[in-house]
Image (cartoon, rainbow, N blue to C red):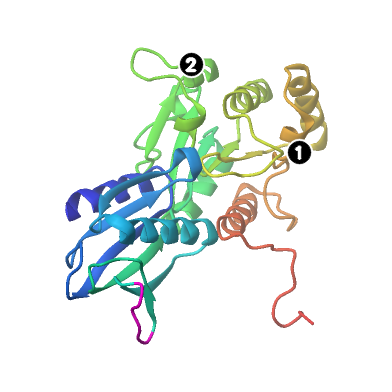
Amino acid sequence: MTAAVLAWALSRLEQSHSVVIASVISTSGSVPGKVGARLALSGFDEDEQCVGTIGGAGLELKVIQRCREMLKQSSKPSGEVITYGLNKGAKGYQVTPLDSLCGGQVTLAIEVIIAMPHVLLMGAGHCAKALVKGIESLEWNYSIHDTRSDFVSAEKFPNSKELHCSTVAAFFSGNENKNAETKHSLSRFSDILLLGHDWVEDQERLISLLSTIELEDGNHLDGKPRIGVIGSRSKWQAFEAECLSAGISQDTLNGIQCPIGLNIGAETPEEIAVAVIAQILAAHKEVDHSQPSWRNHK
């Protein structure tokens, strides 16, 4: 069971979903779960999934609720150790009583593991190559899509998790070797960056993405990637007009990052990569980069 729970947790992390794991680390007296029992939880609300068990009954319900709370509250790796007394009259230092007749005590370690970014680079030109260098140095995951076969290869991007060479329509609609992309399948990416060599392709990508995942009010909700578009003011204005004509709301468009990257005066692909990676890192850690540092804060 332990191996299955850990394997499932790793699979969720590979799909860019954060996970919380609860493990029984010590017991005394009569308890439903023994040392080494584990459960893992990932996702929110209707997308929530839970595997494994720490013994069932009221203890497990209480622990699952605590796992939910920690997962929702954590933007960084975190954890806690908590001891439950399985008797509503349980007393002692840092013991949480439960309405139970077992009478023993169980101590659990609850750990939140935050998934690393998985960035889909749609367009494999100079900016994508510069971004890959930074992404690999941070040990993030990345995947590549390009319509040009000579730009997509394992030799050029040996560490890419996925390599897609197809038309934009085929990427989203699928073919005999690949299912159509859905809101759920696209949630394996934390960020999708439109970096195409052809503005027509990027416009098609943007409309297809937004039509598929239906961003709500521009928020990056769990299971929905952040979307960024490289480009000028005039390019974005043209994209915005086409998206509105396609029935995509202004609120959704307001949630798209364009131009991409922090405003640091970046011009070259390497400078743009620094700005973009910093922006993704800030979003990943839920840090407002516009706020003053400890030195400037008053």
- The image quadrant of residue 284 is bottom right
Where residue 170 appears, x then y in whole percent? 48, 16
- Residue plotted at (35% across, 83% down): 91
- The image quadrant of residue 65 is bottom left
In this figure, which residue is indicated by the disc labeled 2? 173
Where residue 58 appears, x then y in whole percent? 33, 58
Q: In front here: 40 or 27? A: 27
Q: Is residue 188 visible?
A: no
- Stretch in magenta: 88-93
What crowding class fits label 1: few (fewer than 14 Cα within 10 Å), some (14-19), or many (20 or more)?
few
- Residue plotted at (39% across, 82% down): 94
- The image quadrant of residue 253 is top right
In this view, which residue lies farthest toward the bottom? 93
The secondary structure type at the circle numbered 2 is helix
Question: Mark on residue 266?
Answer: none
Q: Quick one: label 1 or label 2, which is nearer the N terminus?
A: 2
In this figure, which residue is indicated by the disc labeled 1? 254
